[in-house]
Amino acid sequence: MTRRYTPTRRRFLKAAVAVGGTAGLSACLDMTDEPVPEGVDDPSTLPARQHAWRESMATDEHGNPVLPRHHTFLYVDLDESGEPSDETRQRVEDALSLLDRAYERSSAGLLYSVGYTPAYFERYGTTPESVDLPAPRRLSDFEDPDFHTQDALLHLASDRADVVLEAEEALFGDGETANGIEAVAFPGTVEDRRTGFIGEGMPAERADEVDGIPEDADVPEAAKLFMGFNAGFRGNQATEAYVTIDDGPFAGGTTKHVVTLQQRLDRWYGDNDHDSMVKKLFSTRKVGDIEGVGANVGDDSGVVPEDFENLIEEANDHGAIGHAQKMAAANRDEEGNIRTVRRHVESTDSGVASLHFPSLQQEISTFEEIREAMNAADVVSETPAIRQRVNNGILRYIFVKDRGNFLVPSREQRALPRPDGSV
Ligand code: HEM
């Protein structure tokens, strides 16, 4: 076993994000001295789409987007009940504008978005006009999730752990400043707080912190994710334009589904050798093509129509089917365009290896269709070797804990929009 135990600044920063609050923040600040790039004087000059992060993120040598390393998911309830007043709306706008003024909109500064739940729109007794935003629901027979019914999700992301913490403290805690600018309180309370991370070496570094990873499992040093493979290739992600709602009062926004999954990595590393992992994560037809964590994959997983045209035959021939292979058909439109932007990050919240999985699409039903394809019900009923959770992609290794659906409106509509889109 070659696990690296690094008592480094990075390990420390991750611990600080998990702790949160001023204790975590002051711990972080002690460790960091680089200045954080500043934001803009006029937030209206920033991109109109809150979800358009790509231009502000780094790319790797293949042009794949590189997500910021640290994430916080703040599930927030407004302090005011009923329909929000104009005063509360203005306070939300002021709090978000503080983030724009304090931090450059980039991975080096802060990327963020705010989204609103169907429960928020219930304050008006209705749903947002012309947006497919149902309440979250169970998406398989074998899950029993909790549902996010808070008003809003503020998703903060940065390469700097101290930035996500400081931003949270400035809006919801005792923080007095954000990057030197006076704090503005958000008129709400964080009811649920989750943290995430992604990046080469981060899962291996944290493998000893969590339950569910066996002693002899060797999360590769080069892996960005606990399961040991890269994901999120440019060729298998929709463009941000594609997932943008194009008509109606919320044109310019998008919908976001967030699921939290618990991972059973003891089983993953115990059941599978490298080829079997490639088969179950990617495709029966990719075995032998993917080296190590997938650094040779380039900018596309290489899952093509031949991988998914004859799923039942592939399953019969290989005794299993791949995760990406099962969903690829549902994740493409008639012209072959990819339909979702997936931005999942790992987590060690509560000492358990887990994954926060946000997916962006024009309509929540698109996500639900793709998730249904992951169940592969037709393959299960036709192929004895494939059961609901056995040999069926990675379903034996992931357990759904909670789900939430959100409308992420355009920047202009981000402060407590009414169902007709007015603010
Ligand atoms: C621990 C959990 C998960 C891991 C490690 C994981 C990993 C991967 C990997 C390695 C790929 C292939 C490379 C790529 O296209 O990025 C992939 C593709 C994909 N995954 Fe996941 N995934 C996880 C959970 C999920 C969940 C919960 C969904 C929900 C629907 C999902 C949806 C997809 C989709 C739509 C694709 C692309 C298929 C295509 O169009 O080619 N994944 N995932």
Image (cartoon, rainbow, N blue to C red):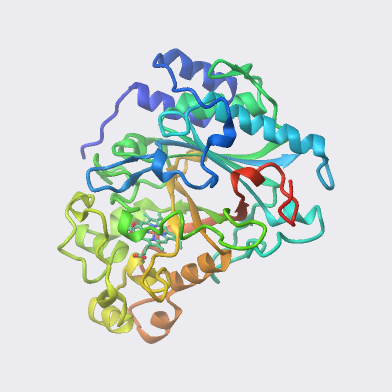
**Any part of residue 187 in sight:** no
Question: Could you tell me which residue is drawn at 43 percent across and 83 percent down?
Answer: 378
The x, y position of residue 321, in whole percent, is 31, 72
Left or right of 103 in this view: 214 = left
The outermost residue toward the bottom is 382
Residue at the spot 83% in from the left edge and 40% down from the top edge: 85
The picture quadrant where one finds residue 190 is top right
Q: Is residue 111 left or right of residue 336?
A: right
Is residue 21 in view? yes
Place of residue 336 in the rendered image (x, y in percent of width and height, measured from the top left) = 36, 71
Residue at left 45%, top 79%?
377
Against 256, residue 364 (above or below) is: below
Q: Nearer the viewer, residue 49 or 277?
A: 49
In the image, 74 versus 351, the foreground residue is 74
Q: Quadrant of residue 118?
A: bottom right
Q: Nearer the viewer, residue 108 or 383?
A: 108
Q: How many marks?
A: 0
- Picture coordinates of residue 96 (x, y %)? 63, 33
For the C terminus, the quadrant is: top right
Q: Position of residue 140 (x, y in %)?
A: 54, 70
Which quarter shows the N terminus? top left
**Considering depth in this image, is 120 or 419 the residue closer to the camera?**
419
Q: Quadrant of ligand 1?
A: bottom left
Image point (67%, 62%), residue name: 135
